[in-house]
Image: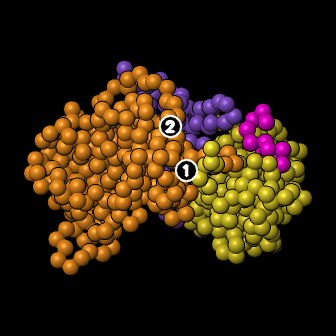
Chain colours: A yellow, B orange, C purple
Amino acid sequence: MPPPAFQGRPRDQTAGNRLPPGQYLTRDFPVLSAGPTPRTPLTAWTFSITGEVAEPKQWTWDEFRKLPSETITRDIHCVTKWSKFDTVWEGVSVDTLLKGIKTTAGFLTAFSDGGYTTNLPLADVTDGKAWVAFAFGGSPLAPEHGGPARLLVPHLYFWKSAKWVRGLRFMARDEPGFWEMYGYHMYGDPWREQRYSGD
Amino acid sequence: MAGATLQRRLTWLQARLSRRLDETPRVKTLVLDVPGWPGHIAGQHVDVRLTAADGYQAQRSYSIASPPDDHDQLSLTVERIENGEVSSYLTDVLAEGEQLELRGPIGGYFVWSTESGGPLFLIAGGSGVCPLMAMIRQRAARGSRVPTRLLYSARSLEEIIYKKELDLLAERADGLEVFYTLTRDHPSGWRGGSRRIDGAMLAEVGFGAEQHPLCMVCGPTPLVEAVASTLVELGHAPDRVKTERFGPTGG
Amino acid sequence: MDETQLRLDGNAAAGIFRELFVREMTVARGACASCGTIAQMGAQHLYMFPLSPGAVLRCNRCQAVLMVVVHRDGRYRMGLQGLSWLEIAE
């Protein structure tokens, strides 16, 4: 019997060691969304560090953009199986945002406009592992991709890189965010294929 | 309001392409033989599933364009979407005699049969005409005289799907009227609409709210949302306006 | 891209509803726990695979999440918190 003629979108599973298990490489940048795109004006935008911290902190957009930022290039991996190599972002390192923050909490919830949340261990957003990104591919981050700013945590599945992020709430315990509540993995390491809870 | 009757489990059925018809440069109708097809109501859709040699699967929903009848055959009208992995396979690659998986019929919300009565106001944008065409074809097959108006928005004359058939059905003068509006370009001497659907056009072409028509709107989401909210502004009760949005993956 | 292009109606969830419920769910009526609006599920706003990691049904008035369905390895997990009630005719 001849093999099926259906090919599907161009995809590569042969990218050597660079592609996590079960992923396909893509060259476009699919837009995924679970709700309407928020449109917070920059004059109203703030980023907050809240929760189990000695002193909460907040930046306006202007204050946030005055912080030192960097350009980084990373591979990203979506739980819906597509991966994209060498994506270029500009953002403020979460280490910069957490400078001087005193906390004993080991976990945090990133929260976004529109109500989206996702949970992360503190250790996974520090030491150069996470940014609040405001530009992609050299241009300001488009609203459908999470602009004006999104969390960027490339070493985990991309649902952890919360679009339209407005802050981090520190917590003593790991609490499931939106997708985690509905069955996605609490941690989400693409290299161990941790897509769903119990994986 | 239709009750929610008990349903059989949906299983994937093997469908074989019997023939493919050109509708417009980008749109084709696939006539499929589906042994064991349980029948459907106009407006329902099917899920189509394709599997590549490496096991990769893609799944999309398509409205059934053919009216309910007694045969194990149904038609899907598919628009080739730019970079569409499923649509381009269906319109250009799948060969006669080859198979695909489908399941259905699916949907109880955006449906119409002659028993539902009218008047019936159908508003279509582009390939959104497909489920509405199943309703129009069912109406014709039953010899129904339910007052029906189709307002069909397309970019150009050559992109009107089913035009010949629609014009023939309208000529029967059995209560079906068809209005076209072209939004990008139109031929000289064109007597149909030449702009996007707006409130004035809906008020002029459609049944008035006082006639309590059932309004069925189908097409790209932005058109559907604009038309649906305008119909409500014109006085149509929200539960008399039903919508089916086709997302960017087509319908 | 206009983000409304990502939005579907609850009608597009009819397939996944069929996998889970015995009765046709798109004609089921439900009350939004946030704003109280009552409407058929087919009329609500839907964000779904392949454009979302799971199916999210939102109130067509206030956009609050009504229902979430994630189809994962061999099971479905459904969240229904956003509905005060769901009503299905026989």
The spot of residue B43 in percent (x, y) is 34, 42
Q: Which mark is residue A35?
A: 1
Q: Name, please, the residue furthest toward the left.
A: B173
Q: Is residue A106 left or right of residue C30?
A: right
Q: Nearer the viewer, residue B148 or C25?
A: B148
Q: Name the residue located 73 percent from the left edge and 65 percent from the top edge.
A: A133
Q: Amino acid at mark 2?
A: Gln
Q: Quadrant of the N terminus of chain A?
A: top right
**Residue at the (37%, 35%) spot, across then down:** B72
Residue C53 position in % (x across, y down): 63, 46
Q: Which residue is mark 2?
A: B14
Q: Amino acid at mark 1?
A: Gly
Q: Quadrant of residue B211?
A: top left
Q: Are discs 2 and 1 less than 8 Å apart at CB?
A: no
* Location of residue A94 with respect to B138 vertically, above or below: below
Asked if residue B142 can be seen in this view, the reply is yes
Part of the protein shown in magenta: A188-199
